[in-house]
Amino acid sequence: MSFRFNFSVNEDEGESDATSEELEEVHSSNPAPKQIDPLKLDPIPISAELIHYSDHLTLLKRQVHDAKLEFCQNVELEDNNSNISKTITESTDLITGVYEGGLKTWECSLDLCAFLSELDFNFKDKTVLELGCGSALPGIFCLTKGSTVYFQDFNEEVITLITIPNLILNINFEKLMKEIDLKEAALETIVSPQEEEVLKSRRCRFFSGDWGSFESVLRSEEKNIKDFDIILTSETLYEKRNYKSLLTVMKNLTKKRNGFCLIAAKANYFGCSGSLKEFENLILRDEVFNWEVLKIFDGNNVRREIVKLSWKL
């Protein structure tokens, strides 16, 4: 069985070789970048599900249909200008430059979580940035291990509907596991951002907007921000036009010498222009980072990899 994303893309984006022009951002209707305050969110009744990935990794996440239902209850889709409304009405996984797939939990996000859970590494007091976080499970894992984590996604609604609820679910994992219907692996609960100590302590921050403007917003909102020990990203290499801005953020925000980036991605994204090889070629041409494949997953006819970028000394 072949694998293909249900993505809305232009036919001329399927060429195999990236040019300098194609590496330029072309988002014409980017949402205004901003920092999101989770303490301003009202309590949210949600439906969650249990993900048992391996013996080392069990997580909770909000069900996508539940997030979409909440959104629909609060807006008139036909009259709403939100980018999320377009993906609901058009039933698509992604609309490039409009909605970047953040409601769905993609395979490589779980791969990266599993890899982190098996890693012999002390996450306590580390600063972590997850780019294109979506369901944000890798960043949430680091948060539960004592890191300070910044979450960034293209769409503000993804942060409020998925990222923050998932964070609260997993921060309260042990408590909620006593309430879950294990037969159905499902849970009905209410998450209250204003009551969560981890959100009050500001051990996590949330940003929306594109990568091209992210750094300036980050530094204007967080005056004391320094570079990050770890930058995480998963399933963000499907569109090669975004590579330049992704690499720029990584170079500007990864802590020098000991900082590193972890990328989880598929070897190919059928129906889209990006691939691991395309991004590797850009890294090799740039000659700033080392490229090291840490783990390979073979399944569903599509190879998936976890790659480490570290500074060339």
Image (cartoon, rainbow, N blue to C red):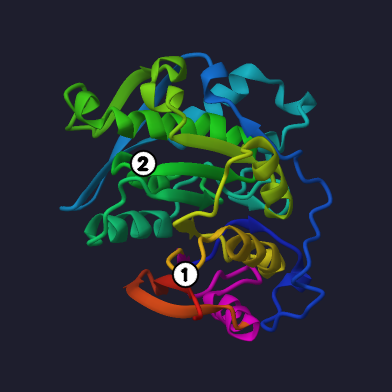
Pick whichever of labels 1 and 2 is earlier in the sequence: 2
Residue at point 53% right, 74% down? 268
**Badge 2 amino acid:** Leu
Viewer-proximal residue among 132 and 85: 132
Q: Residue furthest front?
A: 224
Task: Check disc 1: other Cα within 10 Å, few if <14, some if 14-19, many if 20+.
Answer: few
Q: What residue does disc 2 label? A: 143
Please report the residue visible at 47 percent of the width from the left and 28 percent of the height from the top.
66
Q: At 65% across and 43% down in the image, what residue appears? A: 218
Please indicate, yes or no, whether residue 210 appears anywhere in the rendered image: no
Q: CA distance from mark 1 to mark 2?
A: 23 Å
Magenta part of the protein: which range?
260-286
Residue under pointer 1? 257
Residue 209 on image: x %, y %? 69, 44
Q: Residue at x 28, y 30 (%)?
A: 186
Number of numbered discs overlaid on the protein picture: 2
Residue 220 at x, y = what percent? 70, 39
